[in-house]
Amino acid sequence: MLLKRGLAASVKDWLLSAEYVLSQGNRGVILCERGIKTFEDSVRYTLDITSIPVLQSWTHLPVIIDPSHAAGKRDYVPAIAAAGMAAGAHGLIVEVHYCPSEAQCDGPQALLPETFKELMQQLRKIAAIFNKEFSEVSEAARA
């Protein structure tokens, strides 16, 4: 189960939600940091990078990030993704579309496939610095 952080939830609130799911028998919980609402308006939401190391010290659950959702604009996604990986995220979700202007949803935040490929190369380098393995799983690979 992918448990996304609420826009106004504290890290403790989020973990209490995870604890409830775990208490009901679901052991497959993954936490997803996708940004919180702040006073900043240059991006959709502020991706709380600090939540990643905090969660890693408080829980055993894996933490992924959603830089596409947080940014709302494709130009910012690669930098936010790199920051999240450097902060220790276990993975990420990124919107990709071959023609974002024709996407049924999330077009403005979707990366072009070429940009996504470049991002994955950069993230592999970041993962190597921290001695982490990095693999790409796409929607097509799951189908």
Image (tube, helix red, strand yellow):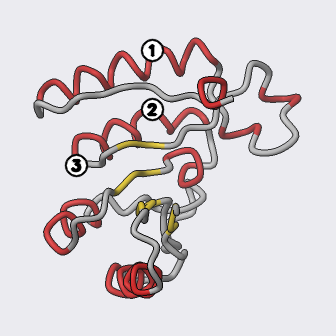
Q: Which residue is mark 2?
A: 78
Q: Amino acid at mark 3?
A: Ala
- SS at mark 1? helix
Task: Indicate which disc, 3 or 2, sits on the residue closer to the N terminus.
Answer: 2
> Between residues 45 and 130, which one lies in front from this camera angle?
130
Quadrant location of the C terminus in the rendered image: top right
> Which residue is rendered at x = 42% and y = 60% of the image?
30
Q: Are marks 2 and 1 in contact (CB under 8 Å)?
A: yes
- SS at mark 3? loop
Q: Marks 3 and 2: which is nearer the front?
A: 3
> Between residues 38 and 120, which one lies in front from this camera angle?
120
Please state the horizontal and vertical placement of residue 25, each as a whole percent of the image: 44, 79
Task: Indicate which disc, 1 or 3, sits on the residue closer to the N terminus.
Answer: 3
Instruction: Measure the alpha-carbon separation of dots 3 and 2.
Output: 14 Å
Instruction: Measure the alpha-carbon separation of dots 2 and 1.
Output: 9 Å
Please state the horizontal and vertical placement of residue 122, each as a whole percent of the image: 33, 20
Say which quarter of the image contains residue 92. Answer: top left
Which residue is most to the front?
25
Q: Amino acid at mark 1?
A: Glu
Q: Which mark is residue 133?
A: none
Task: Indicate which disc, 2 or 1, sits on the residue closer to the N terminus.
Answer: 2
Instruction: Measure the alpha-carbon separation of dots 1 and 3.
Output: 20 Å
> Which residue is rendered at x = 84% and y = 34% of the image?
103
Instruction: Say if 100 sits above or below 125 in the image.
Output: below
Say which quarter of the image contains residue 48. Answer: bottom left
> Which residue is rendered at x = 58% and y = 12% of the image?
114
Please state the horizontal and vertical placement of residue 135, each as a whole percent of the image: 37, 25
Q: Which mark is residue 118?
A: 1
Q: Amino acid at mark 2?
A: Pro
> Which residue is rendered at x = 84% and y = 29% of the image?
101
